[in-house]
């Protein structure tokens, strides 16, 4: 009897869990669609801004003498620290499958090869700015330097949200506090697929500036000066790149959470089915035993 009651209690608990996960799945699905639309619609603007700033650097290469177009690694003094700023984006909340663990695992793997990939000086130091509670916890746990931390900016981040971060990064480069900057986040691929993406933010990559394009045959007259145009575009370039990766991170979060909640709901329903079968078998065995007791008692009386 106690076994049957226990199974019924477990069935009831599993059904309650299934209801909760189903509700969370539906909420995440709704948020996911909006986040995906925002992320995908921002990509053309981000890519176009990269094209514009790269084209400007290509066309006016001889007129530009901006420090963010120069490779800081060249002739870097061995005794001077080479500082790298990394913006790490994660989620504030859990229940999104392996999204954050994949992010941090991929980041640690990338950091191991960072000096080799970018041919950095031996005296390289890392500083982090985090967006999301999980990113902050990971950086503090790993003992790395955390310069600033921001919570997530909700399900629909606004462009204004990233302006303080952009100003902080630009100010750091102007003061020569940082020589390079990267953005690490989970890029949205599809509803069931998100992958680590690490992109260099500053300085503008040399390989992009020297890359050949079809437009190089055209001469341009810059008014005002190319240096002034570049200085005006640079903050907008940084802001747009930051906003884009923030939207990508939010889309990845809601996609991963929707899939995680769907899997949790499916598992809960499977457990309900298994427990229901077990309950029916236990109940049938109980009824059979009771019938046997009745028959045995009747036979004893005869």
Image (cartoon, helix red, strand yellow):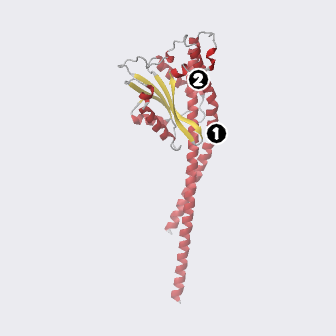
**Dot 2 lies on which element?**
helix
Could you say whether the residue bearing mark 1 is in a helix, strand or loop? helix
Disc 2: CA contacts within 10 A as few (<14), some (14-19) or many (>=20): some
Judge by depth and name the residue closer to the eye, 52 or 254.
52
**Residue under the point 58% across and 23% down:** 50
Residue under pointer 2: 50
x and y, in percent, of residue 184 in the image: 50, 32
Quadrant of res 16:
bottom right
* Marks 2 and 1 in Cβ contact (< 8 Å): no
**Residue 133's disc number:** none
Instruction: Please provide percent x and percent y for residue 14.
Output: 55, 56
Place residue 128 in its image quadrant: top left
**What residue lies at 58% left-to-right and 41% top-to-bottom?**
255
From the image, state whether disc 2 or disc 1 is nearer to you: 2
298 to 179, vertically: above or below = below
Is residue 172 shown above or below 291?
above
Q: Nearer the viewer, residue 59 or 245?
A: 59
Q: Horizontally, is 18 left or right of 128 in the view?
A: right
In the current view of this chain or complex, which residue is farthest to the bottom?
A: 302
> Picture coordinates of residue 40 (x, y %)?
63, 33
Q: Which residue is mark 1?
A: 33
Specify the farthest residue to the left: 79
Q: Earlier in the sequence, mark 2 or mark 1?
A: 1
């Amino acid at each position: 009897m106690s076994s049957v009651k226990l199974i019924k209690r477990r069935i009831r608990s599993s059904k309650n869990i299934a209801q909760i996960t189903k509700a969370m799945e539906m909420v995440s699905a709704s948020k996911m669609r909006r986040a995906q639309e925002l992320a995908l619609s921002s990509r053309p603007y981000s890519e176009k801004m990269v094209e514009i700033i790269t084209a400007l650097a290509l066309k006016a290469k001889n007129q530009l003498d901006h420090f963010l177009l120069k490779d800081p690694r060249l002739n870097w003094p061995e005794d001077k620290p080479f500082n790298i700023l990394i913006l790490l984006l994660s989620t504030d909340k859990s229940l999104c499958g392996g999204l954050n663990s994949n992010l941090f695992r991929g980041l640690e793997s990338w950091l191991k090869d960072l000096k080799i990939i970018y041919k950095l000086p031996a005296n390289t130091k890392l500083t982090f700015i985090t967006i999301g509670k999980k990113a902050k916890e990971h950086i503090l746990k790993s003992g790395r330097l955390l310069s600033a931390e921001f919570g997530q900016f909700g399900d629909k981040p606004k462009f204004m949200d990233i302006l303080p971060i952009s100003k902080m990064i630009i100010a750091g480069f102007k003061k020569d506090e940082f020589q390079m900057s990267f953005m690490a986040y989970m890029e949205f691929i599809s509803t069931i697929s998100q992958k680590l993406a690490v992109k260099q933010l500053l300085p503008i990559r040399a390989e992009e500036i020297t890359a050949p394009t079809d437009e190089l045959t055209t001469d341009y007259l810059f008014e005002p000066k190319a240096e002034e145009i570049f200085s005006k575009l640079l903050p907008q370039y940084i802001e747009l790149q930051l906003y884009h990766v923030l939207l990508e991170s939010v889309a990845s979060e809601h996609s991963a959470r929707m899939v995680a909640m769907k899997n949790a709901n499916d598992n809960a329903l499977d457990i309900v089915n298994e427990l229901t079968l077990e309950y029916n078998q236990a109940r049938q065995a109980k009824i059979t035993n009771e019938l046997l007791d009745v028959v045995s008692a009747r036979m004893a009386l005869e």
